[in-house]
Image (spheres, rainbow, N blue to C red):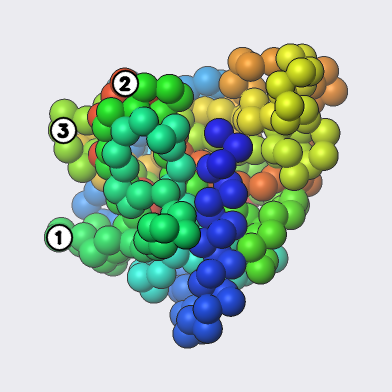
């Protein structure tokens, strides 16, 4: 799994060093869709609605999800490129990652296959939203696949991002294929789980403190657009062993936000309008 963030760094460096046109600025507003479907919650902690005020929707399990109102946009995808919004000190690009045993669209970026990960135009706009990130794939037999973006990755590097001003993340998502796996994991690596933090062991020798034991939440998706609200306090380690001092996520040292799919399952997911909320 160490290759997953290396791939995006290579892609980002190519984009920035290759003389691409300046990235268009994203809207400051966060567009919640009109007429969206029921809300989807996240598991692994307290209700994904948290205590933040906002709209309430019917949750995937029959409960309510409250959409926060104080949201700072990370990316609404409307500019059509792979970069997140350069605001709040954030710089990053969307990337794909997988275990190499199946097929995924968009594919993992390599020098031999320099395919960028750009938003897809929606055939049916979601309110004001006309574009979203879309990934699909199948046939993975080792640990699976996913997509994500770095939070502080200027010039192809990877540095920690301080998200201590926020309470969690919120985004909209849906299945592209009704027959695809409905479960998606949201992973947020911090300085205790990412090799860039200089704390975890990437060699595999220290089984009590391995790298890539990221902070996770799980959500179930449907075929209609639905908000997913994940408070940071609801995240837990993935179970591969945890550094004893890392009982909660270190919000001063986050590296990325990733959306993962397990091995042995076909996946097809749209993701849109992602932001931090306070």
Residue under numbered circle 3: 178
Q: Please report contact status of discs 3 and 2: CB closer than 8 Å, yes or no.
A: no
Q: Residues within 10 Å of mark 3 (few under 14, many from 20)?
A: some
Q: Nearer the viewer, residue 54 or 40?
A: 40
Task: Tell me which label, 2 or 1, sits earlier in the chain.
Answer: 1
The x and y percentages for residue 277 are 58, 50
Residue 200 quadrant? top right
Q: Nearer the viewer, residue 181 or 235?
A: 181
* C-alpha separation, residue under disc 1 versus residue under disc 3: 16 Å
* C-alpha separation, residue under disc 3 versus residue under disc 2: 17 Å
Q: Residues within 10 Å of mark 2 (few under 14, many from 20)?
A: some
Residue 236 quadrant? top right
Q: Nearer the viewer, residue 278 or 185?
A: 185
Question: Disc 2 or disc 1, which is closer to the eye?
Answer: 2
The x and y percentages for residue 168 are 59, 42
| Residue displayed at 36% across by 22% down | 141
96 left or right of 3 in image: left
| Residue displayed at 49% across by 47% down | 148
Q: Secondary structure at mark 3?
A: loop
* Count of marks placed on residues: 3
Q: Secondary structure at mark 1?
A: strand
Question: Disc 3 or disc 2, which is closer to the eye?
Answer: 2
The x and y percentages for residue 256 are 60, 47
| Residue displayed at 67% across by 66% down | 154
Taking 128 as reference, is 22 above or below it?
Answer: below
Q: Which mark is residue 56?
A: none
Q: Please report contact status of discs 2 and 1: CB closer than 8 Å, yes or no.
A: no
Residue under numbered circle 2: 264
Taking 159 as reference, is 52 above or below it?
Answer: above
* C-alpha separation, residue under disc 2 versus residue under disc 1: 29 Å
Residue under numbered circle 1: 123
């Amino acid at each position: 799994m160490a290759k997953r963030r290396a791939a995006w760094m290579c892609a980002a460096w190519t984009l920035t060093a290759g003389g691409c046109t300046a990235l268009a600025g994203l809207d400051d507003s966060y567009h919640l869709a009109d007429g969206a479907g029921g809300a989807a919650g996240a598991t692994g902690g307290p209700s994904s609605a948290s205590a933040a005020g906002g709209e309430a929707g019917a949750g995937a399990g029959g409960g309510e999800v409250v959409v926060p109102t104080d949201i700072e946009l990370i990316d609404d995808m409307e500019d059509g490129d792979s970069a997140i919004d350069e605001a709040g000190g954030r710089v990053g690009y969307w990337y794909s990652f997988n275990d190499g045993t199946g097929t995924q669209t968009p594919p993992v970026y390599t020098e031999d296959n320099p395919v960028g990960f750009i938003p897809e135009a929606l055939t049916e706009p979601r309110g004001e939203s006309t574009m979203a990130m879309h990934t699909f794939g199948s046939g993975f037999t080792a640990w699976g696949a996913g997509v994500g973006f770095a939070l502080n990755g200027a010039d192809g590097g990877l540095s920690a991002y301080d998200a201590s001003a926020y309470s969690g993340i919120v985004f909209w998502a849906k299945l592209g294929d009704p027959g695809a796996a409905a479960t998606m994991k949201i992973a947020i690596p911090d300085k205790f789980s990412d090799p860039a933090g200089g704390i975890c062991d990437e060699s595999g020798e220290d089984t009590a403190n391995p790298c890539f034991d990221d902070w996770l939440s799980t959500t179930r998706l449907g075929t209609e657009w639905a908000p997913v609200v994940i408070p940071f306090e609801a995240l837990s380690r993935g179970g591969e062993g945890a550094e004893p001092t890392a009982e909660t996520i270190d919000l001063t040292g986050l590296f990325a936000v990733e959306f993962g799919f397990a091995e042995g399952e076909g996946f097809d997911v749209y993701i849109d309008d992602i932001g931090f909320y306070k």
